[in-house]
Image (spheres, rainbow, N blue to C red):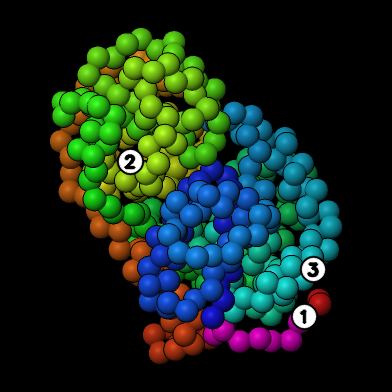
């Protein structure tokens, strides 16, 4: 069996919420062939998924165009979607041909609607998956654009061409989308390697480890300008200035990201699905820089406040390195019980059933069956 997984590269969160499910599925179906179609770097996929896979470095969706890490360029985003949809049928036909060449038995898309439309056009079973869809994101930012009504109609029809959209907790409401199926949270739970990390860095057991991670999106920070914070050591993105004492590049650690997250005393990030749910499920407090115009943010933060520990800081406070008080505060907060990432086994079981062709548990999902139908050109 061959599974094509289409992953949005709007940060690394889409991969983060997909990789644990695919890892579980690969153990259930040892002969499963995997192809990732995404501009997420192959190295990063391999760091989250230690199984063999093919990689097609191509994007089939736009996401949103960013002015900065925290600000969406609404005009550029509207124009980018319009450029695709002005020749929408040609785009679907091209994606269908590319998908046919890859010859998957099933397409899983997080969360490209073009990938779903292309698979449906080629007669290949397809499923949507994830915590968001680009219809709701596009509507939020671009609804005032004169081209929006036609584009939204085409986007919604593309999502509806999937047999099912698998949502994972927490997620955007998708009442407009037929055939959704809800699963629990998805996050990697790994062993605590704090003692090992401290030893490798030559640090004592009382040092506070702080992970700084922004999901593959650049944030121009010069942490050499930060004030000294005794007793704390920061693991930061490689493109930040690393002055030496008190800072280490994440890349130098050569450890899986989820191991670092589990092992640190706190994490500083923007609120995206992957970091929010993994922080909660691993019991790691999260200090977040708010994205004031991101429609998924409140859903994620409300869920995290019910299941973990979170504190908000403004972006300028992070840029200045004014982190002592927030870290003291969050480290003193009581940790609630860590939620279980039940969505991994639930989604993997569903995909296993689809690929194996046993529809006993899925009486209304016959289109999941790994079978070919005639190519449709309409």
Q: Is residue 300 visible?
A: no
Residue nearest the observer in this picture, 344 or 189: 189
- Say above or below: 255 vs 268: below
- Tell me whether the residue at label 2 lies in contact with that at label 3, contact meaning CB atoms closer than 8 angstroms: no
Q: Is residue 185 left or right of residue 328?
A: right
Q: Residues within 10 Å of mark 1 (few under 14, many from 20)?
A: few
Q: Which residue is under mark 3?
A: 93
Residue 23 in the image: state x and y as whole percent. Answer: 41, 65
Rendered residue at 79%/68% (across/down): 93
- Say above or below: 30 vs 371: above
Q: Which mark is residue 260?
A: 2
The magenta stretch is 368-376
Residue 139 in the image: state x and y as whole percent. Answer: 63, 47
What's the CA distance linking mark 2 and mark 1? 47 Å
Residue 262 in the magenta stretch? The answer is no
Q: Quadrant of residue 193?
A: top left
What's the CA distance linking mark 2 and mark 3? 43 Å
Q: Which residue is under mark 1?
A: 376
Q: Is residue 18 visible?
A: yes
State whether the magenta stretch is mostly helix, strand or loop.
Answer: loop
């Amino acid at each position: 069996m061959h599974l094509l997984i289409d992953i949005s590269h709007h940060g690394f969160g889409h991969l983060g919420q997909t990789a644990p499910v695919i890892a579980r599925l690969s153990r259930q179906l040892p002969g499963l062939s995997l192809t990732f179609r995404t501009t997420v770097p192959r190295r990063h996929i391999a760091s989250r998924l230690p199984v063999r896979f093919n990689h097609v470095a191509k994007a089939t969706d736009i996401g949103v165009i960013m002015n900065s890490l925290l600000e969406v360029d609404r005009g550029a985003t509207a124009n980018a979607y319009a450029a695709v949809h002005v020749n929408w049928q040609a785009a679907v036909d091209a994606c269908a041909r590319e998908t046919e060449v890859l010859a998957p038995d099933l397409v899983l898309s997080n969360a490209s609607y073009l990938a779903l439309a292309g698979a449906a056009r080629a007669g290949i079973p397809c499923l949507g998956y994830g915590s968001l869809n680009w219809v709701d994101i596009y509507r939020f930012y671009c609804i005032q654009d004169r081209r929006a009504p036609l584009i939204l109609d085409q986007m919604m029809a593309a999502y509806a061409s999937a047999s099912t959209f698998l949502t994972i907790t927490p997620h955007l409401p998708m009442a407009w989308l037929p055939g959704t199926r809800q699963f629990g949270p998805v996050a990697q739970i790994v062993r605590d390697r704090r003692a090992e990390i401290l030893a490798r860095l030559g640090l004592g057991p009382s040092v506070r480890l702080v992970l700084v991670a922004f999901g593959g999106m650049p944030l121009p920070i010069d942490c050499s300008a930060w004030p000294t914070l005794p007793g704390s050591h920061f693991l930061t993105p490689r493109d930040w200035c690393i002055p030496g004492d008190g800072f280490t590049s994440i890349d130098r650690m050569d450890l899986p990201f989820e191991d670092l997250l589990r092992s640190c005393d706190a994490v500083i990030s923007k609120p995206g699905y992957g970091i929010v749910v993994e922080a909660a499920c691993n019991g790691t407090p999260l200090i977040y820089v708010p994205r004031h115009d991101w429609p998924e943010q409140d859903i994620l933060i409300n869920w995290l406040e019910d299941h973990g520990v979170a504190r908000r800081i403004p972006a300028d406070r992070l840029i200045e390195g004014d982190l002592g008080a927030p870290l003291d505060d969050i480290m003193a907060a009581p940790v609630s019980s860590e939620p279980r990432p039940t969505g991994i086994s639930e989604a993997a079981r569903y995909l296993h059933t689809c690929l194996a062709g046993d529809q006993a548990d899925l009486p209304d999902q016959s289109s999941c069956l790994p079978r070919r139908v005639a190519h449709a050109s309409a």
